[in-house]
Amino acid sequence: MQERVRRAILTSKNVTILPHSNADPDALGSACVLAYLVNKINPVANVRIVVSDGIGGECKDLARLCIEMNIRIEAVKRFQQVETRIEDLCILVDVASTEHLRYAKQILKTCKTIAILDHHSIHNYETDLFTNSEVIYLVDPAASSTAEIVYRFINEFNVKVESDFLKILLAGIIWDTKRFQRISSNTFKYVNEMIERGVQYAETIKLVENVKPVYSRIARIKCLLRHRGFKATINNKEIYIAISEVGAYESDCASTLITIGYDIAFIINTDESLKILRIIYRARENLIEDVKLDVYENIIKKLTDLFGGGGGGHKGAGGAVLRTFNVETVIAEIIKILNRISGNNLVEFVENRVG
Ligand SMILES: [Mn+2]
């Protein structure tokens, strides 16, 4: 499989690397190092990274470092900003669903070869986007992160890489494993190799640890003020579920709700311009094992089946784009599903505001 990728890289002139929209350190870091690898293997290739919806606040420093290393990143916030050309090779990086490419999705139709590099266990690809392309799947759900898969490539292709690129990959691993809370059997071995090759661990942590901007703080406060809380009893165990809505920083909103004690948090964000709605979830993984609830399969999938759209994710995190603009209907549907799963053992918390 690696040989097919190497051949595709060697014979390509235009290469576009596509991380998921609003790229996080795993997606952007992997894309950045991959761009470098492609040029190492094929120095005449025109390589660019195209990312929709900009870059997540948590990887601004990482993006800066990547640009300093002469990697070309195009951030697109509208359809019109996507510059299409004939692509010899497109590489999807950390993309669980083609919906997560957002504005950059149309690029896929121009690609002769599409390589999919990912570690998600559940995928949702609009395969008619692939009909004119040769597709190479490089998916490894056992990997802790996409960065880990890219690191393996460096070893397999036997490419010498500057330590700043390894630092970027390590940042991706730290981010996606939530500082090594969920690892693969190779994670520590790879991290050790990176450190032996000159990566400073303390410096790397700083890359993904920058202070949250004030907007994130406001989004988290609004998220708390707006949320609805529920208690469901499933298999004789009580689980706590939150639903909220914010205009940005959905994942900060979700992790805030999980931090205060919820087991599952659903966050909705509507997109005026595209007339769609995005929903993301976070869930405590151990509890989900206890009550045998797969948030993606049992809840999110039901929503995409009903409203249209697509998504992807892990047991602990994921999301979808829904082809509707009606928040109330979506929330009513989530409540309906939770009622069904819990055998009508769902109670909403009702509290008055202070004062
Ligand atoms: Mn990832």
Image (cartoon, rainbow, N blue to C red):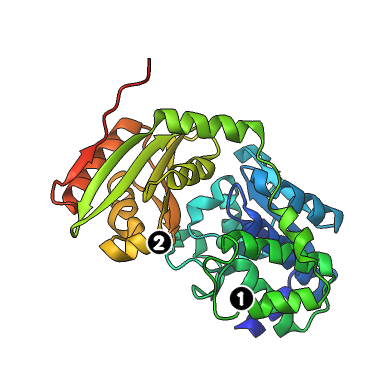
Q: How many marks?
A: 2
Residue at the spot 76% in from the left edge and 69% down from the top edge = 166
Q: Position of residue 187 (x, y in %)?
A: 61, 75
- Asked which secondary structure carries label 2, the reply is helix
- Asked which secondary structure carries label 1, the reply is helix
Res. 285 mark: 2
Q: Position of residue 316 (x, y in %)?
A: 43, 59
Residue at the spot 55% in from the left edge and 39% down from the top edge = 249
* Residue 256 at least partly seen: yes
Q: Position of residue 314 (x, y in %)?
A: 44, 62
Q: Residue furthest front?
A: 355
Res. 165 mark: none
Q: Position of residue 91 (x, y in %)?
A: 63, 65
Q: Is residue 247 left or right of residue 315?
A: right
Which residue bears the numbered disc 1? 187
Q: Earlier in the sequence, mark 2 or mark 1?
A: 1
Residue at the spot 50% in from the left edge and 56% down from the top edge = 98
Please tell me in which quarter of the rendered image ligand 1 is found. bottom right
Residue at the spot 46% in from the left edge and 44% down from the top edge = 254
The relative height of residue 286 versus residue 103 in the rendered view (above or below) is below
Crowd tier of the residue under label 2, counting other residues whose Cα lies within 10 Å: few below 14, some 14–19, many 20 or above: some
Q: Is residue 328 left or right of residue 210?
A: left
Q: Which of the two residues, 29 or 222, is positioned nearer the viewer here?
A: 222
Kind of residue at badge 2: Glu
The relative height of residue 65 versus residue 223 in the rendered view (above or below) is below
Crowd tier of the residue under label 1, counting other residues whose Cα lies within 10 Å: few below 14, some 14–19, many 20 or above: many
Kind of residue at badge 1: Thr
